[in-house]
Amino acid sequence: MEEEKKANFLEEIIEADLASGKVESILTRFPPEPNGYLHLGHAKSLCLNFGLAQKYGGKTNLRYDDTNPTKEDTEYVDAIKEDIKWLGFKWEKELYASDYFEQLYEWAEDLIKRGLAYVDDQTQEEMRANRGTVETPGKNSPWRDRSVEENLNLFREMRDGKFADGEKVLRAKIDMAHPNMMFRDPILYRIKHAHHHRTGDKWCIYPMYDYTHGQCDSIENITHSICTLEFDVHRPLYDWFIKTLGIYPSHQYEFARLNLTYTLMSKRKLLELVQKGLVAGWDDPRMPTLCGVRRRGYTPEALKMFCEKIGVSKRDQLMDIGLLEWCVRQDLNERSNRYMVVSDDPIKVTLTNWETGKVEWFDAPLNPADPEGAKRRVPFTGELLIDRADFMEDAPKKYFRLRPDGEVRLKYTYIIKCNEIVKDENGKVVELKCTYDPMTHPQSGQWRSVKGTIHWVSTAYAKEVECRIYDRLFTEADMGGIPEDRDYKEYLNPESLVIKTGFAEPALLDDNSGIAVQFERVGYFKKDPDSTSERLVMNKTVSLKDSFKI
């Protein structure tokens, strides 16, 4: 009997809230800032917010945190929706923080009228210097005791565009000596004369995250606002605004963010890689973006399996990317079609006893997991290509691939024997002259066992393929732990992309499965959008070899 899985701490909270009647139904939200593309860290948050709502019969809103017009764009808005749909999630409402700008402004005026907010003329440097430290209290702004009337007039003039960027800010009046530095008169609004992707030029003042997020949750009646762990220090301020304004009591809960080996998930640094041309774009298959891993061949099912495996915790930890690759293999192994592709510096194999011009077609399963399922037709002739790694002239005793006077089975077909080696003027092996045993036809012949089986393609029918071999983008496992005085770009892997020319059996060109296929004995590959009718481009998704232990 399968052991029942123990609830994680978020599930325990939700179950308790439902049982006690604290909430009648669950409403979560996914609140991305549209200033970049979603990455693997967002996948964990998506699986949590949407997954928890689904499990407990609730709903999830998609709400864009669009309060920084200089960095946001509709390109990112559209890309985020595409990624969420690809993962298989459906949001209840599509909302924007900008939908609530008028309400947020009214609440800010309410705080001013109650003596809980003021306009400050200090520069950023002055505010930073006067904020104090963990050990020492901050200093009050010289503008902190302005009258309510003056603050209201100045704030309205800020909205009307009478001041330059950075000339003034609106701050909450809380406590400059508070032990939680988030409470030391946080900024509520700053001036930004910038065009907004939705509101245009209507606004030139924009609310800060800490003033916006909780109130947006409250307006939407979000029951469980689930954030990553770095926001736990923000939670008391989140609660303070909601309580002070007397609005719906949404509550924030924090979980550990996803950190992966050999990976960076800073949108700022990922943007720099794109802008400097160090990768081919946000959807470069080496990038940890969802559009990047989608192009590489990762599946939504594999990502969801990975998020389920890593679980939910309250402590940050570095996860082995090998687990993610294991999940990709598990999913693709069950569903992907198989084809033979030779791409490792091919060697020509000539069958000297094959009838000239003869072509024999073999039926091979598209997926061995379903041997009675769909088949593909593989042409066999007297001239073939094999990977160079499948032949060794001076082979050790336990080498079971092709060797002089040795035998192997060509997958799905006959046993062949290497009789003669042909070399070029530099001593490189360029051709193997072999004979095939016609009595070893797998369907009608006599069974004879050999230890080695290798893949191959028929030269006359081979289709040229560009194989993009992707590896990890960085050479350092813990990219979050590199010294601050080192440039993260120093750790870029120069071998993260190697391009090879491969030769595929013709059936590969007709594959319309939409998911990565398996190059037999090599790995999984996904058709790239760069493919044309004249040239097929395949991205390596993940190798077949799996050293990860689960």
Image (cartoon, helix red, strand yellow):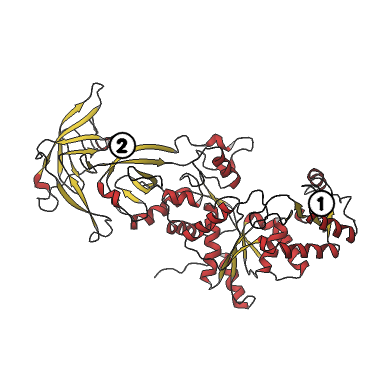
Circles 1 and 2 in contact, beta carbons < 8 Å = no
Q: Secondary structure under badge 2? A: loop
* Identity, as a three-letter code, of the amino acid under mark 2: Asp
Q: Earlier in the sequence, mark 1 or mark 2?
A: 1
What percent of the width, then of the height, locates residue 320? 49, 48
Q: Is residue 447 visible?
A: yes
Could you tell me how many numbered marks the image carries? 2
Mark number displayed over residue 241 = none
Q: Residue at x 44, y 49 (%)?
A: 295
Q: Secondary structure under badge 1? A: loop
Which of 419/190 is in front? 190
Q: Looking at the image, is 469 positioned above or below residue 97?
A: above
What percent of the width, then of the height, locates residue 299? 42, 55
Q: Residue furthest front?
A: 201
- Which residue, given by chain and number where applicable, does mark 2 sit on? 344
Quadrant of the frame with the N terminus: bottom left
* Identity, as a three-letter code, of the amino acid under mark 1: Lys
- Which residue, given by chain and number where applicable, does mark 1 sit on? 162
Image quarter of residue 353:
top left
- Select label 1 or label 2 by which is in front: 1
Q: Is residue 342 visible?
A: no
Is disc 1 surrounded by few (<14), some (14 to 19) or many (20+) residues within 10 Å?
few
